[in-house]
Image (cartoon, grey):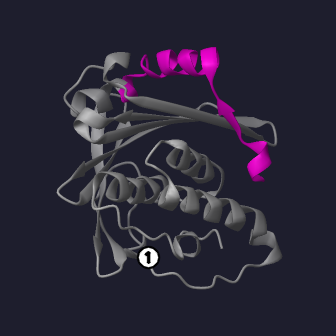
Amino acid sequence: MSQENVDLISGKELKDFISEALTYQSIKALFDFSGVKATEEFIEEAEGAKYKQNSTTTKVLTLKLDQKKTMISLTLHGRDIKATSTVYSDNETFGYQAVGENVYPIVSTKAINGSLVHEWHKNPIFDVEGLPESTPLDKKEVKTSRAQISSCGLCSNICGAIQTSSCGLGGTAGCMVVCAGFAGLACPFICAGIWGLKCWGDGVILCGPICEQLGYC
């Protein structure tokens, strides 16, 4: 998949997507968990994207709740639904995933000594054993194989967008698209964690080799 295959969702389609998202129980649960009702009045910014891989369409919606320093994302991959949120507090991000009415803590992330340090929490959704405990943030050269070029290039572009963005949702919405298409289970939480630390934290985050650490490069 190349960057050109990803289409932003805008206008009436975006508005309809937001309305659809607010009907899902898992999205309602994440809003409730943040202390607000699942209504548009608490959404400061929204961005959606979609692409088709083989015959399956993936759609991603990211909602920004500045009042709660929370980002909620919905991924629809065929019939599969994934609802996640990232909450920023005291220079640390906390990632959650909702299944129906239940919200589970997945990971806590903070920047320490040039790395993102992750504390993965046991949960009934997936096995956290073997997930990365830290992600280096120092810049370095990344070697790629021919088979990795498309995903590596796209991931690198998304990381760059997050790093250099003005904290709009363009970078992180694209990041969630990358995660839906290529990634392991850790990806959306690490992407959102970087964005939260950069945009609600001290603003000093370098992406560096994160794409290599996530297996894209």
x then y, percent, for residue 163: 49, 61
Q: Does residue 180 belong to the magenta stretch?
A: no
Q: Quadrant of the C terminus?
A: bottom right
Viewer-proximal residue among 214 and 47: 47
Residue range in magenta is 1-27
The residue to which callout 1 is attached is: 137
Viewer-proximal residue among 110 and 133: 110
Compared to 181, does 50 lie above or below?
above
Residue 217 shows up from this direction:
yes
At x 71% / y 65%, what residue is drawn? 153
Q: Label 1's element?
A: loop
At x 60% / y 71%, what residue is drawn? 215
At x 38% / y 69%, what residue is drawn? 129
Residue density around tag 1, few if under 14, some if 14–19, many if 20 or more, within 10 Å: some
Residue type at mark 1: give it.
Leu
x then y, percent, for residue 131: 42, 69
Q: Does residue 26 belong to the magenta stretch?
A: yes
Residue 59 shows up from this direction:
no
Compared to 147, does 4 lie above or below?
above
x then y, percent, for residue 22: 42, 19
Question: How many numbered marks appear?
Answer: 1
Compared to 105, does 16 lie above or below?
above
Viewer-proximal residue among 160 and 112: 160
x then y, percent, for residue 97: 36, 43
- Position of 16 with respect to 5 (left or right) is left
